[in-house]
Image: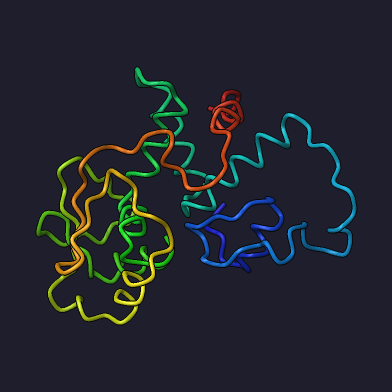
Amino acid sequence: MSRHTGPRVKIMRALGTDLPGLSRKSADRRPYPPGQHGQARRKKLSDFGRQLKEKQKLRLNYGISERQLRRLVAEARSGKMAAGQKLIELVERRLDNAVFRAGLAPTIPAARQLINHGHILINGSRCDVPSARINEGDIIQLREKSRNLQAVKDSVENVSLIRPDWIEFDTPKLTAKITGLPTSDSVPFELEIQLVIEYYAKRL
C-alpha cells in the first residue's frame, strides 16, 4: 500500500487519535469515526483489529509504505535491542521525521517535499532521500538559498510539537544537531508498539 493521500482528518478519526506527523489539524471537533454510523457505539476490536490499528497509526503518521515498514520491523527484530524500542528508533531517525521534529516543516509530508526539492543538507551535503537515516552528531540545515522560504519561517515560528531532547536547534542559523538517538518515549502520539511487532510476527 502506498502513502495516504486522502483527507487526513478523516483517517485520524477512523483511527481514534491525532497523528501530528500527518496533519496539524485535530479530530477533536468530531471525535468519532467517519460515516453515517460513526457516532454509534464502537464494537470491541479483536486482537487482530487492535494490532492492525496500531500498525496503521505508525505507518500513516510517518508516511511509510507497507514494504518499508515491513523491512524496518525485520531489521528491528534482528538486533539485540527490544524489537519495539528499536523500531521506534528507526522510524524516528528518518530524515523527513527529523526535519519535521526540528520544526523546519509543519508535517512529515511537508518535510518530505523540502527534502525532495533539494532544500536540505546533512553535514553540508545535499540529501534528497526522505528515508535517509540520521546519526548522532549529524547537522541538518537548509541550503543557503532556501533559508528565506516563507513556509520554513512560518513553521519555525509556530512549531507543531515541542522539539525532542535529541535535537538541538539553532534558530538564527536554522540548523538542527542530532545530539542523541530517539527512545521509546519519542513517539508523539499514543501507540502500543508491541502490537505492531505482534502484527508482523506471522507475516515476516
Q: Residue furthest top?
A: 80
Judged left or right of residue 156, residue 42 is right
Question: Residue, x 15% and y 53% (percent of image)?
Answer: 139
Question: Residue, x 85% and y 46% (percent of image)?
Answer: 42
Question: Residue, x 51% and y 53% (percent of image)?
Answer: 61
On the image, the x and y values in percent for residue 54 come to: 61, 40
Please determine whether, in this image, residue 180 is positioned above or below residue 108. above
On the image, the x and y values in percent for residue 121 come to: 17, 61
On the image, the x and y values in percent for residue 164 come to: 34, 47
Q: Quadrant of residue 29?
A: bottom right
On the image, the x and y values in percent for residue 80 come to: 35, 17
Judged left or right of residue 169, residue 161 is right
Please determine whether, in this image, residue 4 is positioned above or below residue 66. below
Q: How many marks?
A: 0
Q: Residue furthest left?
A: 124
Instruction: Name the colouring of the figure.
Output: rainbow
Judged left or right of residue 118, residue 75 is right
Judged left or right of residue 172, residue 96 is right
> Between 108 and 188, which is closer to the camera in this rendering?
188
> Between 52 and 177, which is closer to the camera in this rendering?
177
Question: Residue, x 90% and y 54% (percent of image)?
Answer: 40
Please determine whether, in this image, residue 60 is positioned above or below residue 54. below
> Between 28 and 49, which is closer to the camera in this rendering?
28
